Image (cartoon, rainbow, N blue to C red):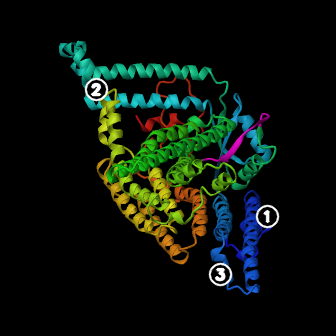
Amino acid sequence: MTTNLKSLRFFPSNQVIQQTFGLDISLFNQQMFYLILLSIGFYMMILAIPVLYAYQDIHNNELNTLTMSLQSSLLRGCLYYFGLLSLTFSAGFFSSLRKAQKHNNKRVDLLIMNIPQNTSEDQIIKSVEHISGNYTIKTILKIVNPKSYNLQEDLYLREKEFYDRIKQDGANKMKEQQGKFWKKMKLTKFVQYFGFYRDYDYYKSQITQLNLKIKISALDQLEEEDAAIVTFKEFNPAQKILKKSKGIFGFKIQSSRVRVLFAPHPNDIIYANLGVNNKVRFGKQVLTFLIVIIISFVNFLILCWMRQLERNLQDKQLSFAGGYFVYIGIFVVMMLLDLIFRPVLYWANYFEQHVSYGEKERSWMVRLFIYSLLNKLSMIFSRNFVALLNLKNKGSDYLKGLAQVFQYTTIWRRGSDTGGSDLISFMWVCIIMYPILEFLAPILYKLCQYSAATTQYDKEIARNGTDIRFTSVWTSVLVVFCTVFSFASVQPEIILMFALFCCIYGVSLKVIQRYLCKRPFQINGVAQTSEIVIIFSILIAVFFLSITYDNWAVWFACGIIFVIFTYIGSLFIFQSVIIPYVNSTEAFLEEESKLYQLPKPFYSILEKQQIESASDPYYTTPRNLQSSFI
């Protein structure tokens, strides 16, 4: 079907789009059009302000033009922002059209969560078909007690390690060698501690404990909710369910409101988190976001205290070496605080209990970016903050200074005892310290993993290498670039330092992947894409620097814009780059060996099946996959 773009006009109605595409896409275009109208309205309103000032200046016989007014106006960054925001909403709208057109006459999978317990498949089908129409459902897969999946997965992993250990040690031949020699070996404590029998006792105890926990979890389901994956024959019925769920009254099953969304890829679903209530999950996400802000604020206060200590020591007229040591100590403390607070972020990302690995990685990128950016900027703005605390007059001067804490002044130029020297030192620390930490972190992780290993199998895994979470690498580069993008107007030389940082960081990353990871570095789509984006970003920064060198307000506004669009860009980068890469055989992360994994065959020892199988092979149960592992 060919699309007549003229019939779409600029603001097409639902009927025009339905006639053009053959689909009812009212779910997409209403909200998107409202956002486009709002952004364009703000864009025109802000554009009128500098035009008005330029008109007044010209009629007052002052040498000022519209171009000069725009260049010197604080609102220039807002013009960029709202212009790009309008383009983003427009692109998102037409992307929704393409998505709807892509789903036309194809199967559509919806994930329905927060289903009350003891709800049968027939009740789910009746509730869905009441909205979408009869005979629109192709298959349905009901997921019962998803909470036990974590325990079942642990059970499977322990069993797999046990059998791999048997295969590795040749213990499968023990039945053929049941002589006196083997009986003596079994009674020897030395062999029991270092050999296979110690591992056997360890795995046996672990499997017994997990089986007991699974039985307890099966009995305790008071707060647990079920889920279901419903496959529709066409797109329009699924869209009606989505539209109903996003309404004021929502979509209900047995008088209980459920959450509906497009089902992720089967390998992407975290089945253990499907039973978590949506309100509980949202509360956890808000809590983790507050934790990130609190950690950043604590880090900021510690750095301010260190800055005050540095000034007190400098007043004592220390030697050059002593003063330099005290000055560098602040940045060392910043690195140590980052190593201390980073595990809290790992815990927060796990605590949120996301539905899919993709959602989990997106949340990780956003929170890590916020934390890292505030961590780095606190180093630069702490001098102004400490100067504000040292004010003797706490009246009007204090309020005026509070408003100027996050503003540039001429002291940001390079000079002795200025904020500019802080910025230069910050960039050198990023260039030198970050590659060193990237080298040391995998080595320290390997040592800790090896020392914490309780079996020979775990020690061998620790020897093989470590994993790299490429979303963390990408986010760390974005943080440094955002800092450069914000302060390049007052310190133009940091652009060259940032180029040097990218070179050193890229080389160190490839060396780490080559010698410290589980597999040799071959083709890394994420790293290659990040290098291209970094080079392109440097060119953009140089271009803006050449045309607006003296206008710090533009750079500050552009820095804020970049923070906002980094969030949007991280979603695009994740969808277009990271997901295709992690599905390959070369992807490794810090927490999971692969981002997407097939659902494990959890039911090798379980007495009761927890998931009712479906005839659709796309969404299948772990029991049906068990034969591929045996």
Q: Nearer the viewer, mark 1 or mark 3?
A: 3
Mark closest to the chain's N terminus, 2 or 1: 1
Query: Could you say which disc has been placed on residue 67 in the image?
Result: 3
Mark closest to the chain's N terminus, 2 or 3: 3
Residue 163 lies, in percent from the top left, at 35, 29
For label 1, the SS is helix
In contact (CB < 8 Å): disc 2 and disc 3: no
Residue 446's quadrant in the figure? top left
Foreground residue, 109 or 551?
551
Marks 2 and 1 sit apart, C-alpha to C-alpha, by 67 Å
The amino acid pointed to by label 2 is Asn
Query: Could you say which disc has been placed on residue 14 in the image?
Result: 1
Foreground residue, 3 or 440?
440
Work out whether residue 247 can be spotted.
yes
Q: Is residue 343 magenta?
A: no
For label 2, the SS is helix
Query: Residue 399 vs residue 298: left or right?
Result: right
Q: Is residue 260 magenta?
A: yes
Residue topped by disc 2: 172
The amino acid pointed to by label 3 is Thr
Magenta segment's dominant SS is strand
In the image, which residues are magenta?
Answer: 253-263
Screen quadrant of the N terminus: bottom right
In the rendered image, the vertical position of residue 539 relative to residue 624, given as above or below: below
Residue 396 lies, in percent from the top left, at 70, 53
Q: Residues within 10 Å of mark 2 (few under 14, many from 20)?
A: few
Marks 2 and 3 sit apart, C-alpha to C-alpha, by 81 Å
For label 3, the SS is helix
In the rendered image, the vertical position of residue 401 relative to residue 74, given as above or below: above
Q: Residues within 10 Å of mark 1 (few under 14, many from 20)?
A: some
